[in-house]
Image (cartoon, helix red, strand yellow):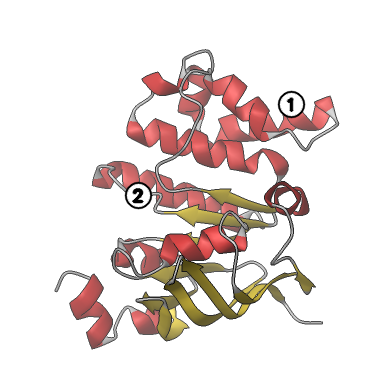
């Protein structure tokens, strides 16, 4: 039995007549952190949105655990265990921290399980427990990112799609977020990580793909990519 939990097969997505993804192929294996790297406009966020069917693919396939989910409705993809944390956090700023977490558990029918998942989020992010009655909009950027990830964990995802979790955060906060992402992965959650900070992403990931103008131009073990001269020059600031 294959250990591939998520695969993209010749996936194409376009906005109007403009192709954002041009026949990309990717595999994410169970238990991995896979980094998707690339410059602004390369198609990284579109890739995640296409997996979640927030943007419809025009050809190719998205497969989850061997099932074609390309045309499955977004909320059903969530129920299957593929959870998307979008760029920019997208928390409910007018609701409390606790209410945000509770909304993340909308697929759960068991109140005991919901309470268990909330407690787990508080264990991972103690600051959220301290601020559970505070409005989401009053949190710092780092705390909002923690809440967005915590909310995503409420349904115990099989695959977590993370879009630019370090964006706009101070380096010390970024390190804390990445440590939590590593912990989540070690607890058994497979992660596809879109990240412009390639140095941080490749340090965390097992494997990586490099996307340029809608095409995969390179892939391999993260340790190998981090030493590749073209990657270093383009993305690692040397």
Judged from this view, the residue extending furthest toward the top is 133
Q: What separation in Å lies between label 1 and label 2 (alpha carbons)? A: 28 Å
**Dot 1 or dot 2, earlier in sequence:** 1
Location of residue 74 in the rendering, given as x and y in whole percent from the top left corner: 68, 51
Q: Is residue 85 above or below residue 135?
A: below
What is the quadrant of the N terminus in the image? bottom right
The answer to whether residue 182 is seen in the rendering is no
For discs 1 and 2, the disc positioned in front in the rendered view: 2
For label 2, the SS is: loop
Residue 27 vs residue 213: left or right?
right
Q: Which residue lies under the disc numbered 2? A: 166
Location of residue 2 in the rendering, given as x and y in whole percent from the top left corner: 76, 81
Q: Is residue 194 above or below residue 109?
A: below
> In the picture, residue 213 is in which quadrant?
bottom left
Residue 24 vs residue 53: left or right?
left
For the residue pair 67 and 127, the one nearer the viewer reads as 67
Residue at x 23% of width, y 78% of height: 232
Q: Which residue lies under the disc numbered 1? A: 115
Residue at x 29% of width, y 83% of height: 227
Residue 118 vs residue 221: left or right?
right
Q: Total of numbered circles in the picture?
A: 2
The answer to whether residue 90 is seen in the rendering is yes
Residue at x 41% of width, y 31% of height: 143
């Amino acid at each position: 039995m294959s250990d591939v939990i998520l695969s993209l097969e010749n996936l194409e997505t376009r906005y109007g007549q403009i192709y954002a993804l041009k026949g990309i192929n990717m595999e994410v294996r169970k238990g991995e952190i896979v980094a998707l790297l690339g410059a602004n406009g390369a198609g990284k966020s579109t890739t995640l949105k296409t997996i979640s069917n927030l943007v419809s693919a025009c050809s190719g396939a998205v497969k989850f655990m061997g099932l074609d989910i390309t045309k499955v409705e977004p909320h059903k993809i969530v129920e299957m265990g593929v959870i998307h944390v979008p760029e920019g956090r997208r928390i409910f700023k007018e609701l409390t921290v606790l209410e945000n977490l509770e909304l993340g558990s909308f697929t759960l029918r068991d109140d005991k399980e919901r309470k268990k998942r909330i407690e787990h989020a508080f264990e991972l992010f103690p600051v959220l427990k301290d601020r559970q009655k505070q409005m989401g909009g009053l949190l710092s950027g780092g705390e909002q990112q923690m809440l967005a990830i915590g909310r995503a964990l409420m349904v115990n995802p099989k695959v977590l799609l993370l879009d630019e979790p370090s964006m706009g955060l101070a380096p010390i906060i970024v390190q804390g977020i990445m440590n939590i992402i590593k912990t989540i992965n070690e607890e058994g959650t497979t992660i596809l990580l879109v990240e412009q900070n390639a140095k941080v992403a490749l340090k965390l990931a097992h494997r990586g793909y490099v996307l340029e103008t809608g095409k995969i131009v390179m892939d391999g073990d993260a340790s190998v990519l981090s030493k590749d001269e073209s990657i270093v020059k383009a993305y690692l600031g040397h």
